[in-house]
Image: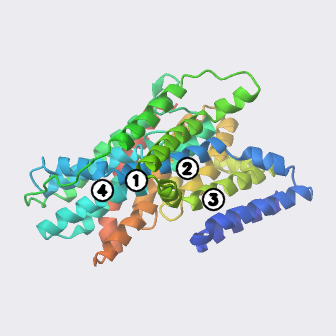
Amino acid sequence: MIPALIVFVVTYILMLSFQKWRPWIALGAAAVMLVLGALGFFEMTPLSALRAVDYNVLLMISATMCIVTLFIESRMPARLAEMMMAKVPNVLWAVTVLSLFAGVVSAFVDNVATLLMVAPVGLAISRKLKISPVPVLIAISVSSNLQGAATLVGDTTSILLGGFANMNFMEFFWFHGRLSIFWSTELGALASTLVLMFLFRGYRDKVDCPVETEVDDLVPSWLMIGTVLMLICMSFVPEPEAGALKTLHGLRSGLSCVLFALIGLVRQSLRERSADPFARAAKGLDLDTLLLLFGLFMVIEGIRAAGVIDAVADIFYRTAGNNPLLLYVLIVGVSVVLSAFIDNIPYVATMLPVVQGIAGLMGVDPTVYYFGLLTGATLGGNLTPIGASANITAIGILRKNGEEVTTKDFLRIGVPFTLTAVLVGAGFIWLVWGK
């Protein structure tokens, strides 16, 4: 167990120190785990490592990225944002509506992509009114991070949970006869919106934002809607008992997304009479995340085979003293704090089997701990400017536009926003799922 634990700890330290090299560090760590398995330190073969990779998750992430690229190119998000801005009376409501819009979109689209869609509207409004765009873009950024946990396709961490817990799209709304994580996320969003309204209470200048963006292609929007509807339909497909059909069933969500992505890309290529749409979609793929996950799935299989996950689960179990509520608070709290400084994708991928092990030791349903983990890890990134990719992107956009962003500027919005959303969301989860 010790060699596998050392490899895992060193891997995390290297990923934190050299973030640009994270995918290659994860793949290198996977190779080391395979070597340790071959040397007999624990039972792990190349075949078992490849089987540990969740290909359904990788397909879903890849395909949705392609669909999002087409959706952004259609300019529909910018037009929708402008249409909403034309209806608001002042900056207070403009920021509130833009933040809510970013949150709703991010429930179905990657958080960074959502920010890139909405940020230009926030910048334009700020310039017209001659106010600082810094708090406006920070509000949009933290809101786009918030609702990633709301649906199966909202964020990579949600896709990871769906794959690990075998949850389909509809089960993010209603799971095992109870309200699911979508509703806790929305309650957190509602509470944090009130926080934003309080923070921006002095912004009363009138907004004049004409609807200027033209959309001449509605197909990408229908593809987005079609993907969601197909995922819902796939939720009702019964699982075959064995064979190739059982394998395909396990990939059904990913393959559905791939189908819609191919339809959109082929159509756009025919319209342009060029293969450029495929090239743009490939450029839009977050290969770093895909390679990182591919390697991490194998690394986690290695520490599982070596008994590290069981040992960590036992430590959590002993710390909580067989108290389900204390354990829940511990998982949520640790997730919030760690995700404020480290990427939540490897953290969630690592902690899901740990949480499963803890629940097994306690003899309880792990669902409440899964949801607590996802809530804490998703929202924790909003505590600091470096805790989430969308925050880093927002600060980069502001600096490119000549704006200086201090840590104090971010914390002023991020801390009350995050703590409110976590307390409300996590509290609701415990009331519904806790014992």
Residue 285: x %, y % from top left: 53, 57
Mark 3 or 2, which is nearer the eye?
2
Q: Which residue is mark 4?
A: 118
Judge from the rendering whether residue 121 lies leftward or rightward of residue 21; answer left or right: left
Q: Is residue 9 above or below residue 62?
A: below
Q: What SS does tag 4 mark?
A: helix
Find residue 292 and name its label.
3
Q: Position of residue 169 (x, y in %)?
A: 50, 33
Which quadrant: the N terminus?
A: bottom right
Q: Which label number is shown at residue 62? A: 2
Q: Nearer the viewer, residue 317 or 256?
A: 256
Is 326 positioned to the left or the right of 242 in the image? left
Which tag is nearer the camera, tag 1 or tag 2?
A: 2
Q: Is residue 99 above or below residue 184?
A: below
Closer to the camera, 225 or 159?
225
Residue at label 1?
A: 145
- Occupied quadrant, residue 5: bottom right
Residue furthest right in the image: 40
- What separation in Å lies between label 4 and label 2 (alpha carbons)? 22 Å
